[in-house]
């Protein structure tokens, strides 16, 4: 019998990679999608005929209860969140509601309707914020630096609490930044690769950025979903760091992307103070020794390979779009 998985945030980056991963393993996959006035399924268009979609929202208790009852899942992957850190200063209450309280709503639904389902909660290295220890481990204390980070700390501890209170198989992956050609355009990796590709194709002339000195431990989303799945295949629920163990600055990211398009980055990058954050997370680097030892997991794609791949994919897709429908500037002229 096929296992059944319910994925929240299935339209996002991780949701799309996890769907592919689980379908390959023979799972029946259900995805929860919130109501939208437009079609949000571009990342999973190629998978729609193989999965089932339910309406639901992390801010709505009844829709989560109904989804868990309808699907009766063996495994639940909770990727849904307001996941962009700068937005969390503009919309702190919404971020707390979706990214924080949304998790207790989901835990309540599981506790009530399917208490033997296994839950993966998408915790974040952003919880370490102003870091207390380097590299960060499962035991490193949290010091979040954004409303998003604070909401994720709540989500993390409420997951631990439901595990300890009700014996749920609920665990968190404390994932460090992970990227891919499907990454949202607002995150720095994709902003850089997409804009470098646009500059190469002559569609734009500059790349405004914030703090070039911030360091992150960037991995590939396609590698990270395997670690998340492995966590739910263990005998007991535990939390794990998911990271590469290597950190790079935003400037290094820029240098690789512009090297891939064969252009000098200094000519195009403009530092814009408006893109600096009210409180920055300067340096994140994870120690994934526990995941390596207990799950037998390790990342495969290197940072440099991933950035070059992202640039390549951006050039490919931008060239296709341009060929299909010339840019407005063209048509006006
Ligand atoms: P993402 O691309 O931003 O996807 C977020 C998903 O959440 C989208 O499918 C979005 O739906 C959905 N969503 C937002 N608000 C919702 C609501 N109220 N109800 C239901 N669904 C809602 O994020 P990602 O990069 O895949 O990350 C997945 C998860 O891992 C997130 O929880 C994120 O915070 C966490 N995380 C990510 C990283 C990383 O580096 N990528 C690292 C650590 C932790 P729409 O398509 O309708 O917007
Ligand atoms: O790509 P970012 O926006 O990712 P950030 O803030 O680290 O958050 C991501 O990773 C977290 C895991 O630690 C996730 F939980 C979260 O959901 C999200 O996926 O920014 C990375 C760094 C920051 O230090 C930022 O200040 O890049 C710096 N940066 C410099 N210029 C910029 C820019 N970030 C963005 N988004 N845009 C810029 O122009």
Image (spheres, helix red, strand yellow):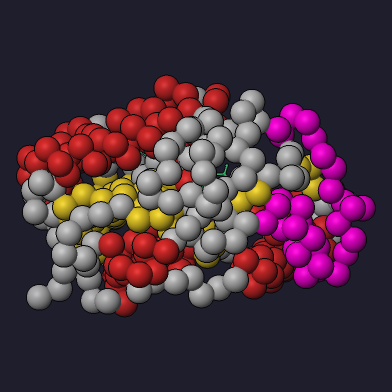
Q: Is residue 134 above or below residue 276?
A: below
- Going by the image, does 136 lie left or right of 74? right
Coordinates of residue 267 in the picture (x, y in percent) = 92, 53
Quadrant of residue 37 in the image?
A: top left
The majority secondary structure of the magenta stretch comes to: helix
Coordinates of residue 62 in the picture (x, y in percent) = 17, 34
Q: Is residue 256 magenta?
A: yes
Q: How many marks?
A: 0
Quadrant of residue 260 in the image?
A: bottom right
Residue sitting nearer the eye, 317 or 131: 131
Residue occupying the point 67% across, 56% down = 248
Q: Is residue 276 above or below residue 72?
A: above
Residue occupying the point 67% across, 69% down = 304
Using the rendered image of the protein, determine whether residue 117 is visible from the camera's viewpoint. yes
Q: Is residue 24 above or below residue 283?
A: below
Residue sitting nearer the eye, 123 or 183: 123
**Range drawn in magenta:** 248-276
């Amino acid at each position: 019998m096929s296992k059944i998985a319910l994925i929240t945030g299935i339209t996002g980056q991780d949701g799309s990679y996890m769907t592919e991963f689980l379908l390959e393993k023979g799972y029946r996959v259900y995805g929860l999608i919130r109501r939208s006035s437009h079609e949000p399924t571009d990342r999973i268009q190629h998978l729609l005929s193989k999965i089932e979609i339910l309406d639901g929202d992390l801010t709505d208790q009844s829709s989560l209860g109904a989804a868990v009852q309808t699907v009766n899942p063996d495994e639940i992957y909770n990727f849904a969140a307001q996941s962009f850190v700068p937005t969390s200063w503009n919309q702190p209450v919404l971020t707390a509601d979706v990214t924080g309280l949304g998790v207790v709503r989901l835990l309540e639904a599981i506790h009530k309707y399917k208490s033997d389902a296994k839950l993966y909660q998408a915790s974040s290295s952003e919880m370490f914020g102003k870091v207390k220890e380097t590299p960060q481990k499962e035991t490193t204390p949290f010091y979040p630096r954004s409303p998003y980070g604070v909401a994720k700390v709540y989500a993390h501890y409420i997951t631990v609490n439901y595990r300890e209170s009700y014996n749920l198989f609920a665990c968190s992956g404390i994932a460090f930044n992970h990227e891919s050609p499907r990454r949202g355009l607002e995150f720095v990796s994709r902003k850089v690769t997409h804009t470098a590709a646009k500059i190469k194709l002559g569609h734009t002339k500059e790349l405004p950025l914030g703090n070039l000195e911030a360091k992150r431990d960037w991995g590939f989303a396609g590698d990270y979903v395997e670690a998340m799945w492995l966590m739910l295949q263990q005998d007991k629920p535990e939390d794990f760091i998911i990271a590469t163990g290597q950190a790079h600055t935003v400037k290094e990211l820029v240098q690789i992307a512009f090297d891939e398009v064969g252009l000098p980055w200094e000519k195009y990058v403009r530092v814009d103070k408006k893109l600096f954050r009210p409180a920055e997370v300067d340096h994140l680097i994870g120690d994934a020794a526990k995941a390596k030892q207990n799950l037998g997991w390790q990342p495969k794609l290197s940072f440099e390979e991933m950035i070059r791949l992202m640039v390549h994919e951006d050039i490919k897709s931008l060239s296709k779009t341009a060929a299909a429908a010339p840019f407005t500037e063209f048509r006006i002229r």
